[in-house]
Amino acid sequence: MEKIKGFFINVIIAIWFVIALFSTICLLSLNDFGTMVFGKNTLMIMDSDELEPDYKEGDLLMIKRGSDSKIEVGEKVFYYNSAMNSTVLVYLGKVDNKEPINKSEVTYTIENERVSSEYIIGAEKSTKVFHGMGTLLGVITSQWGFLFFILFPMLFAIIYEVMMIIDTSKKEKELERKEKELDNQQ
């Protein structure tokens, strides 16, 4: 019975460790627009219903950034609001025009707005949607979620370990005291 209990405790600790590691990596990869960027992939949590019916609130979008040569006129792309003057920082729009500036820079006209290629997240066709997972990731990577799901369990684990060390130390002292009593009686 003790082995089964130990096994389940180890499984729970392993799952917690994976969640803690993943959420920490996600938080460290946040950019200025609040999206998580992993190389050419961007994780975006849909926290509003502005892009319904295609993308619902609580969805997690994984948008792959292809090269500028693969984005064609007429395609829909996700892009950052470069002005950053509104609460919506990510838009989805149709590319009306594409102007190469040099080998690494392209300016897009998206719904009558000029957007530099550095603000393009990726094409809609290269987007994977995970329904409902955005809510879960949003909770884990929020400040309160990180506090309750990562830091508090870690604090409790440290306190538990310290208590176990103190308990073991007390037991060793008690054992030493009993051994001295036995030696004195003989």
Image (cartoon, helix red, strand yellow):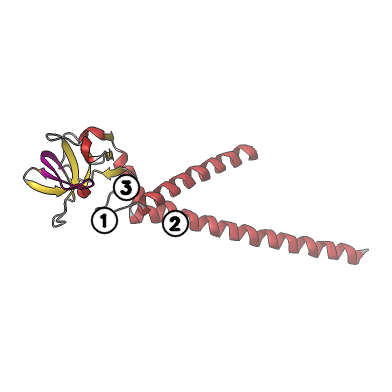
Q: Return the mark for residue 37.
A: 3
Q: In this figure, which residue is indicated by the disc labeled 2?
A: 151
Q: Quadrant of the N terminus?
A: top right
Residue type, numbered disc 1: Asp
Choose top left, top right, bottom left or bottom right for residue 175. bottom right
Q: Return the mark for residue 32.
A: 1
On the picture, is 164 further left or further right than 30?
right
Element type where label 3 sits in the image: strand
Q: Quadrant of the C terminus?
A: bottom right
Decide whether the magenta segment is chiefly helix, strand or loop.
strand
Q: Return the mark for residue 40.
A: none
Q: Give, as a single range, the part of the protein colored magenta.
A: 92-109
Residue 97 visible? The answer is yes
Choose top left, top right, bottom left or bottom right for residue 161. bottom right
Query: Are there few (<14), some (14-19), or many (20+) residues within 10 Å of tag 1?
Result: few
Q: Looking at the image, is mark 3 or mark 2 earlier in the sequence?
A: 3
Residue type, numbered disc 3: Val
Residue 143 part of the magenta segment: no
The residues bearing labels 3 and 2 have C-alpha atoms spaced at a distance of 24 Å
Of circles 3 and 2, the one toward us is: 3
